[in-house]
Amino acid sequence: MRRSTLQCLLFVVSLGMIAPAAFAKVTETDFGKTKDGVEAKVFEVTNKNGMKVRLMNRGATLIGVDVPDRDGKLADVVFGFDDIAGYESKANSYFGCTTGRYANRIAKGKFTLDGKEYKLFTNDGPNHLHGGNGESLDKVVWDGMPFDKDGVSGVEFTYTSPDGQEGYPGKQEMRVTFTLNDKNELKIDYSAKSDKPTVLNLTNHAYFNLGGAGSPTINDHVLKLNADKYTPVDDTLITTGELAPVEGTPLDFRTPTAIGKRVDQLTKTSALGYDHNFVLNRDGAAEGELVEAAKLVDPKSGRTLTVITDQPGIQFYGGNFLTGNKGKGGKPYAYRSACALETQVFPDSPNKQGVEGWTDCVLRPGDEYTHTCVYAFGVEK
Ligand code: BGC
């Protein structure tokens, strides 16, 4: 059921309540038409603190997150564009999208499942990246349904990916639900079912700068990653199959460290900086249990972002491919001026089934894929 803001407010007033739900609201506005003539929509979710989250149906994309700094001043901390044309342009490097069917890289754009080889589009040198070409999940238009219940509000996006889309087997029914609560936590729940055995890895690809999108650097942000190990990559950024210790490398973020402190030690590697998957310490947590994966702090504004997930890995990408293209408000998105923290299974899992310590990415009919990621915002004094 779709409700306007006014209807939501009237509903709450009619119950005579001043409960958290009184503040929760979702509005829906038009965002123009895609190149294919489909209506793009933006849903804005506001909580009682005035935090706002904006979501678009194309790509089930997180296009805006307004959060307070230590003085209560709001800034939009994620990269994006002011119009649909920006999202459809080459300047869009997966900003805020739901990424898949397989987020991250698959070596040489192929994999074998149950003895059959599947070929995918190679859009990243010799490899397949983020689900492929024109019909990867970031580029298709999802159905969006706003909700406002039990003191939380959000949007549920659904999409059916046909059998063979972008070369992936199986018709897949997918759901991505974004929920904002009054603790400034944005929860993303993914689920999927397939009618044939397939591989998948969904994530969100938001680029964060807690000083506000368009601030000049991410190198002044302090990062903590709950990971003793990472997955090294070869010259084409494909994981080698090793799980290597972070100890003694610039990838050791077990104690909070400024991103810029050691990044130059990686500039001449194939990753060009930070662009690695970390093996999250789950410390005996059960499957499906949420653990803290990362914490990002902007010492200047005081804004913090804690990433909590049930996934085994997180890709920390430090914006090495950003080149200054203009985004929201005409601000340039400069080299290393944002980072993505993408919760997921390990890269190239379709070609690493059976490798010790590696993650499973196969979804079979009758089973359900689920994944939860929470972006919890806060402030430090
Ligand atoms: C990858 C980067 C890539 C970026 C944008 C990240 O998830 O790790 O290598 O450049 O996405 O496509």
Image: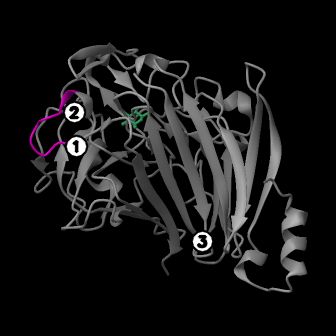
The residue tagged 3 is: 69
Decide: marks 3, 1 in contact (CB < 8 A)? no
Q: CA distance from mark 3 to mark 1?
A: 37 Å
Name which residue type carries label 3.
Asp
Q: Judge whether 232 appears above or below 162 on screen.
A: below
Name which residue type carries label 1.
Thr
Name which residue type carries label 2.
Thr
Q: State the extent of the magenta-drawn residues as a range.
A: 351-358
Q: Residue at x 69, y 68 (%)?
A: 149
Q: Secondary structure at mark 2?
A: loop
Query: In which quarter of the view is residue 41 placed?
Result: top right
Q: Which badge, 1 or 2, comes first in the chain's sequence? A: 2
Instruction: Provide residue 228's location: percent of width, then percent of height.
Output: 16, 58
The residue tagged 2 is: 269
Q: Secondary structure at mark 1?
A: loop
The residue tagged 1 is: 359
Q: Is residue 255 magenta?
A: no
Query: In which quarter of the view is residue 226 placed?
Result: bottom left
Query: In which quarter of the view is residue 79 placed?
Result: top right
Instruction: Provide residue 117's location: percent of width, then percent of height.
Output: 26, 14
Instruction: Provide residue 343's location: percent of width, then percent of height.
Output: 38, 50
Mark 1 or mark 2, which is nearer to you? 1
Residue 343 seen from this side = yes
